[in-house]
Image (cartoon, rainbow, N blue to C red):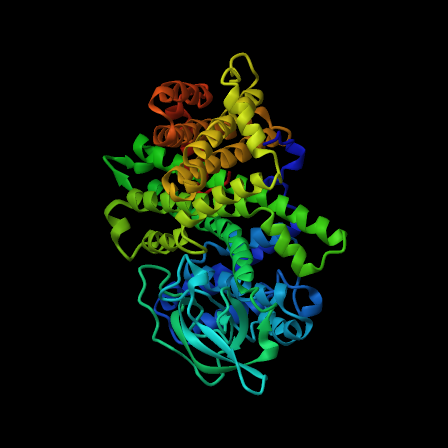
């Protein structure tokens, strides 16, 4: 919708020494306390995961989001995201710690009253207590508000009597404190309660047997006439659905950071093995087919990183602005993230699918050994798959992003429909990339790609009207286009900003990354736009619209084979991800 100044964009190369120290502490913790015990963790050795979380609490790693007065070491949003990235390479352990510090702790921190926060938050920060988030039910997954768990006020008015069942609860086997969502009486919407595992009536099934993240505790939890003190109602009656959604927004962008850590570790294993494994008399890293895979792993990870930290800085700026105007800590964090709900949803999808690509190709680079559970890529492959389901499935997040865009446009939060109509009515407005400097050409390309999305908005709105919500395939086409543009623009802005930090020779490899990403992203945008057009446009308009789409998706051609080889050769030489 607008031009972005690179001075307003944060890039990972701008992290300060304090952030790097926090990140290094997280990596050191994994190296010393987690990686040596991965098999024991996956076997769910009794007490092991809880003890590792407590050790993290002793080091302050559970309190990065928590104010000092509540026993934490409150860090900036960017610092928290960088710590999440570092911990994201911890396989099942990363799931446990992210669930505890995120969806487990933050509902109480952000929505709890002073008494609730004083009672629970310091012990959650230290690791004396563990936390879980209990939303999903057997009949209520994506449609969370259809849950059947009920709470009824007792005759003496001192307790809510809670009855129901929750499933797929991360940390369920050892969490002392649970945020449980239930409907009071016959309410249409959820409320939220702080429930303690030790209370009478709380019971659970054995551990679930899962495809991946085997070390993560996942249980069904049952509530049978559990007496919840009325003072443990979290927030207001009927506010539970809002709490659930806002915590999930935060969980999505944090998951997008954790997958970066997972991707970088999988790339490390990929290139190490490619450099060691010999076939036909030479290391397999020397073969073009392997270089292609290694380069694509780098490109997807670099793009994810660029977009996630750009969005994170925007969120941080909004939070700080709200706090400066007097908004309370919890509300500022909630609203700051909610303002970027679209980016949170898109980055969750983009990052989880990028990681899936990276780990899949890691297995392929290992060949037959990759299918053996004796190799590290086996665990990476299985553990990655859950990320496309966590925090709302990728399909739900795709639909959420477009739905939020259209609703905010209708509320005139930005001039979406006016801008879209302007683009639709002026098909001649396609910028030429010829004769422009490198960065200017990329900026013009991004503007054209944005217009490729905007040109579809009037068409789908008029073709489907109020039934647009039923056209999920078309909405997901639009979402895929948005996602690719955001990641591509973020990467282009990062590369442009890097030009002031690095020598021209150093910049060549970053241009290679951006060139490959440009070709890949434009192709996806073109296909998604083409699929959308033939789904809604009248037959006599389709050819003209498809022709205009193709013009707006044009990218200056580059030799991507050679670019990928140079990216891979840099990775092979360093034998680790250093981009």
Instruction: Kindly identify the residue that appears in the image at 42 percent across and 44 percent down.
Output: 469
**Residue sitting farthest toward the top:** 435
Quadrant in the picture for residue 465: top left
Is residue 87 in view from this perspective?
yes
**Quadrant of the snapshot with the N terminus:** top right
**Residue sitting farthest toward the right:** 325
Position of residue 158 measured from the top left corner of the image (x, y, whole percent): 59, 84
Rendered position, 37 above or below 472: below
In the picture provided, is 214 more to the left or to the right than 105? left
Rendered position, 531 above or below 40: above
Position of residue 371 measured from the top left corner of the image (x, y, whole percent): 25, 51
Position of residue 201 measured from the top left corner of the image (x, y, whole percent): 44, 83
Q: How many marks?
A: 0
Rendered position, 469 above or below 219: above
Camera-side residue of 320 and 277: 320
Instruction: Kindly identify the residue that appears in the image at 62 percent across and 61 percent down.
Output: 64
Is residue 502 in view from this perspective?
no
Instruction: Kindly identify the residue that appears in the image at 39 percent across and 37 percent down.
Output: 474
Camera-side residue of 28 and 188: 188
Camera-side residue of 129 and 293: 129
Rendered position, 550 above or below 360: above
Position of residue 19 measured from the top left corner of the image (x, y, whole percent): 63, 51
In the picture provided, is 353 more to the left or to the right than 493? left
Camera-side residue of 514 and 478: 478
């Amino acid at each position: 919708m607008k031009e972005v100044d690179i001075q307003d964009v944060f890039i990972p190369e701008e992290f300060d020494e304090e952030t790097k120290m926090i990140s290094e502490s997280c990596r050191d913790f994994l190296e010393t306390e987690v990686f040596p015990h991965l098999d024991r963790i996956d076997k769910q050795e009794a007490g092991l995961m809880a003890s590792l979380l407590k050790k993290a609490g002793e080091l302050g790693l559970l309190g990065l989001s928590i104010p000092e007065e509540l026993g934490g070491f409150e860090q900036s949003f960017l610092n928290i995201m960088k710590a999440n990235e570092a911990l994201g390479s911890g396989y099942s352990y990363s799931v446990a710690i992210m669930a505890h510090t995120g969806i487990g702790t933050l509902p109480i921190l952000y929505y709890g009253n002073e008494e609730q926060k004083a009672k629970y938050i310091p012990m959650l920060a230290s690791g004396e207590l563990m936390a879980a988030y209990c939303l999903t039910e057997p009949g209520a997954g994506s449609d969370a508000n259809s849950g059947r768990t009920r709470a009824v006020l007792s005759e003496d008015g001192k307790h809510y009597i809670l009855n129901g069942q929750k499933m797929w609860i991360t940390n369920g086997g050892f969490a002392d404190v649970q945020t449980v969502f239930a409907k009071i009486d016959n309410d249409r919407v959820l409320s939220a309660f702080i429930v303690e595992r030790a209370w009478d009536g709380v019971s659970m099934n054995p551990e679930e047997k899962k495809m991946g993240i085997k070390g993560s505790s996942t249980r069904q939890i049952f509530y049978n006439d559990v007496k919840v003190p009325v003072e443990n109602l979290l927030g207001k009656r009927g506010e539970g659905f809002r709490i659930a959604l806002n915590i999930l927004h935060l969980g999505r962008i944090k998951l997008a950071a954790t997958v970066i850590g997972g991707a970088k570790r999988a790339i490390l294993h990929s290139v190490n093995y490619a450099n060691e494994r010999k076939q036909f008399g030479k290391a397999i890293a020397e073969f073009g087919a392997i270089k292609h895979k290694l380069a694509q792993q780098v490109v997807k990870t670099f793009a994810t990183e660029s977009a996630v930290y750009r969005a994170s800085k925007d969120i941080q700026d909004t939070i700080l602005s709200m706090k400066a105007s007097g908004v309370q800590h919890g509300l500022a964090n909630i609203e700051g993230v909610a303002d970027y709900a679209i980016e949170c949803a898109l980055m969750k999808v983009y990052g989880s699918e990028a990681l899936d690509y990276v780990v899949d190709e890691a297995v392929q680079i290992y060949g037959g050994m990759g299918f053996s559970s004796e190799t590290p890529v086996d665990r990476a492959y299985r553990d990655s798959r859950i990320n496309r389901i966590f925090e709302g499935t990728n399909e739900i997040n795709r639909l959420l992003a477009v739905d939020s865009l259209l609703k905010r446009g209708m509320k005139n939060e930005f001039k979406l429909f006016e801008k879209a109509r302007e683009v639709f009515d002026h098909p001649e407005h396609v910028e030429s990339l010829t004769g422009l400097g490198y960065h200017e050409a990329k900026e013009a390309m991004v503007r054209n790609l944005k217009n490729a999305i905007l040109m579809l908005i009037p068409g789908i709105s008029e073709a489907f009207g109020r039934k647009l919500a039923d056209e999920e395939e078309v909405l997901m086409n639009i979402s895929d286009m948005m996602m690719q543009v955001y990641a591509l623009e973020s990467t282009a802005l990062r590369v442009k900003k890097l030009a002031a930090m690095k020598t021209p020779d150093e910049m060549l490899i970053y241009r290679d990354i951006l060139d490959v990403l440009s070709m890949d992203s434009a192709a996806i945008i073109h296909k998604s736009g083409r699929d959308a057009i033939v789904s809604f446009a009248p037959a006599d308009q389709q050819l003209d619209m498809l022709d205009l789409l193709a013009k707006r998706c044009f990218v200056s051609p580059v030799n991507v084979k050679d670019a990928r080889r140079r990216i891979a050769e840099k990775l092979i030489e360093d034998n680790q991800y250093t981009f």
